Image (tube, coloured by chain):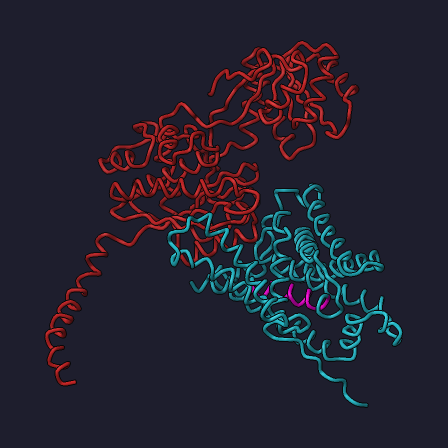
Chain colours: A red, B cyan
């Protein structure tokens, strides 16, 4: 025992000097700063399960890149990934953990509209920033005080694109046929707005998508003498509608959603029925440098639109923190439009380059992989790329992405 | 952290009410109600719509109880000949029907957008933190009152008659018990409780949508009652808090297993839920707090 004690004197000295030294340690660590926390709340299980994991990995990959380049505001960023289970009840529980326990500055990637609507109030009440890929019009109507932006084009923007395209193709009398969907009404209003702005006229018809024949509906459409028809339905009913219109001798333009007039539809009907039909779909900006960086970063050849959007969201949030000089949710809210759409900003396609410019005091304007990423005051994107295709010789052929 | 604990305990209380509802009908009289979440949804929508039309919150909660009870009556009267698996299938279908009606009747329920901005009682007066504390207290008191009432029921002659029906309904009928009457009453009370839980949930979260009411909640509550002890109200309550504790605690495990990707970890969480149910049923089928059969007093 005695021997132990005497031996321990040296150890004691060593240990106590270590202890003294360690008191200096926290302040050293402090200079580096505690990590800034950002939460991902994507559907890792449930019906959104195919998308959420890639989204979470993408956020992690961007953050790793930024951390490797020195972090933001002299601090590292830490990503905490939670699962919303594609269910608002579970999503709220996950969000509370992110907000109350982890105290994240921002949550990115909520996917289902119901989850976003359930989580949004927690975010604005706790001054946490929320970036989402949900599309329902109602989301940006919530009283979110600016704490919410989304990168998914809403129905209003999609409707406008259809109308503008019809007008650009020279159509003066545009008819909208659609089954009853949550989007039909808003879609038609915005088509009308765009067509009337170009001096045209519109009319619409809502039909029952379970009917086997649309003889009387087609009669009504033809009475309007349209030179363009926009289809708001899904594949089965649009198939029937196209056949009936062909039989009725309709010669004008046809415009449909890409998810309705798809390869399957084109293959299943006689070529002349669908020949010349245009399709429109929101698109990632595949020619952008941001998109090409993303493909390289995550090693996925054609990332889905949600992954592309979440890549833009995390880049914007990191740059917004740098531009504000503060990592809080309120700072992100106040600064996000300074980095997304500064009129005199240098165009950047990733946060690492953006952070360098911001450090030099230069304004930046992020041009993302999903599109230009400019937000309205309500939090919607003001413009997005759309993919236009046309059926030519029985094949869907790309016309343009714009 | 404190705010999170308060939140988890409030959710635990709402789950506990659902567990008490399920325990009454499943543990008490032996009817399997796989449509629990449907009655939960009815209560939530009833209260959200009533208070949305300008009625005070207490009326909304009363309405939720009434709507739940009526739905319970309709279900039992429509399925008097069904037992066991067949009743389970019908109730499972009923919950889906309720969810689909909520999804499609846009004029009433606002469809997939759901109802947001549901009144949170006293929130403006109490502030965020105050409201959360107040609501935790309120939910806990309701759970306590309902638990005491159901425990009283469990030990009364009425409770013994219910359990006789559970064990052998023909025999109970021979003994002069009105089997259908007991079933209807028990189902109505159980459904009313689930409705109340739904109303409490709606006013706590301020937002409900058809997506909230997927069968997942029913599964959690079955797990809670099975783990806590079928046939004993205290078991259901304990089980509900254990389930919420378990669901929330597993969120903190990724730090221990950093080599798992988030998606893998999320899948593991779901596996753990299922695994724990199997383990409970294998090693402690009577639950944490087994049922007590108190002998009837000699008269």
Q: Relative to B144, does residue A387 appear above or below in the rendering?
A: above
List x then y, in percent, for residue A290: 37, 29
**Where is residue A15 drawn, in percent x and y?**
15, 71
Q: Position of residue A244 (x, y in %)?
A: 74, 17
**Residue drawn at (77%, 57%), measured in percent from left and top?**
B87
From what the image shows, is residue B27 above or below residue B120? below
Quarter of the view holding residue A205: top right
Please tell me which residue is depicted at 37% across the width and 43% down the height of the picture.
A60
For the N terminus of chain B, the quadrant is bottom left
**Residue at 79% across / 60% down in the picture?**
B83
Nearest the eye: A14 or B135: A14
| Type of secondary structure dominating the magenta stretch | helix
- Can the viewer see residue B143? no
* Residue A308 in the image, given as x and y percentages of width and height: 44, 34
Q: In this rendering, is residue A76 above or below A356?
A: below
**Left or right side of A222 for A264:** left
Residue A121 seen from this side: yes
Q: Does residue B88 show up magenta in the picture?
A: no
Task: Judge from the rendering whether residue A56 lies leftward or rightward of residue B247; answer left or right.
Answer: left
Q: Quadrant of the C terminus of chain B?
A: bottom right
Region rendered in magenta? B12-25
Q: Is residue A137 above or below residue B40?
A: above
Q: Nearer the viewer, residue A225 or A80?
A: A80
């Amino acid at each position: 025992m005695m021997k132990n004690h005497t031996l321990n004197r040296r150890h004691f000295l060593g240990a106590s000097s270590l202890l003294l030294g360690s008191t200096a340690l926290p302040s050293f660590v402090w200079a580096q700063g505690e990590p800034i926390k950002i939460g991902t709340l994507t559907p890792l299980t449930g019906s959104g399960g195919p998308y959420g994991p890639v989204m979470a990995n993408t956020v992690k990959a961007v953050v790793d890149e930024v951390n490797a380049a020195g972090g933001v505001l002299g601090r590292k960023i830490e990503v905490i990934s939670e699962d919303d289970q594609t269910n608002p009840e579970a999503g709220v529980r996950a969000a509370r953990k992110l907000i109350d326990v982890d105290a994240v500055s921002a949550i990115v990637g909520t996917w289902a509209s119901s989850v976003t609507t359930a989580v949004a109030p927690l975010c604005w009440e706790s001054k946490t920033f929320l970036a989402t890929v949900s599309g329902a019009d109602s989301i940006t109507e919530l009283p979110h005080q600016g704490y919410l932006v989304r990168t998914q084009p809403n129905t209003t923007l999609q409707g406008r694109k259809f109308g503008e395209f019809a007008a650009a193709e020279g159509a003066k009398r545009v008819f909208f046929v659609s089954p009853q969907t949550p989007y039909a009404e808003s879609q038609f209003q915005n088509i009308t707005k765009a067509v009337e702005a170009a001096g045209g006229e519109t009319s619409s018809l809502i039909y029952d998508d379970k009917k086997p024949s649309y003889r009387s509906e087609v009669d009504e459409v033809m009475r309007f003498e349209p030179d363009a028809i926009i289809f708001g339905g899904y594949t089965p009913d649009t198939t029937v509608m196209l056949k009936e219109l062909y039989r009725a001798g309709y010669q004008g333009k046809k415009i449909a959603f890409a998810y309705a007039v798809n390869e399957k539809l084109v293959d299943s009907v006689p070529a002349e029925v669908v020949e010349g039909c245009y399709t429109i779909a929101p698109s990632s900006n595949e020619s952008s440098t941001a998109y090409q960086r993303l493909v390289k970063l995550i090693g996925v050849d054609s990332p889905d639109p949600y992954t592309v959007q979440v890549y833009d969201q995390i880049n914007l949030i990191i740059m917004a923190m740098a531009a504000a000089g503060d990592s809080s949710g309120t700072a992100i809210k106040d600064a996000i439009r300074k980095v997304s759409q500064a009129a005199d900003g240098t165009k950047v396609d990733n946060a690492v380059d953006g952070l360098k410019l911001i450090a030099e005091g230069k304004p930046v304007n992020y041009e993302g992989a999903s599109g230009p990423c400019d937000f309205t005051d309500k939090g919607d994107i003001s413009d997005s790329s759309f993919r236009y295709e046309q059926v030519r010789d029985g094949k869907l052929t790309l016309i343009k992405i714009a | 952290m404190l705010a999170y604990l308060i939140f988890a305990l409030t959710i635990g209380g709402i789950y506990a009410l659902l567990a008490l509802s399920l325990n009454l009908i499943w543990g008490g009289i032996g009817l399997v109600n796989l449509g629990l979440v449907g009655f939960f949804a009815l209560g939530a929508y009833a209260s959200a719509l009533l208070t949305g039309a300008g009625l005070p919150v207490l009326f909304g909660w009363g309405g939720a109880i009434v709507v739940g009870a009526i739905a319970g009556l309709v279900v039992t009267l429509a399925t008097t000949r069904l037992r066991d698996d067949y009743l389970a299938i019908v109730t499972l279908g009923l919950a889906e029907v309720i969810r689909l009606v909520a999804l499609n009747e846009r004029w009433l329920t606002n469809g997939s957008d759901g109802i947001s901005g549901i009144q949170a009682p006293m929130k403006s007066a109490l502030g965020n933190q105050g409201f959360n504390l107040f609501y935790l207290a309120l939910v806990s008191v309701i759970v306590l009152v309902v638990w005491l009432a159901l425990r009283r029921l469990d030990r009364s002659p009425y409770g013994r008659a219910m359990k006789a029906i559970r064990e052998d309904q023909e025999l109970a009928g021979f003994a002069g018990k009105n089997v259908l009457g007991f079933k209807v009453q028990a189902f109505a009370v159980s459904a009313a409780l689930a409705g109340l839980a739904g109303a409490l949930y709606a006013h706590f979260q301020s937002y409900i949508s058809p997506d909230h009411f997927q069968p997942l909640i029913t599964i959690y509550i079955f797990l809670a009652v099975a783990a806590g002890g079928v046939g004993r109200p205290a078991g259901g309550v304990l089980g509900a808090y254990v389930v919420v504790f378990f669901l929330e605690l597993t969120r903190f495990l990724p730090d221990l297993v950093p080599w798992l990707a988030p998606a893998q970890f999320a899948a593991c969480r779901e596996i753990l839920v299922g695994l724990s149910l199997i383990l409970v049923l294998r090693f402690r089928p009577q639950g944490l707090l087994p049922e007590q059969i108190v002998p009837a007093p000699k008269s």
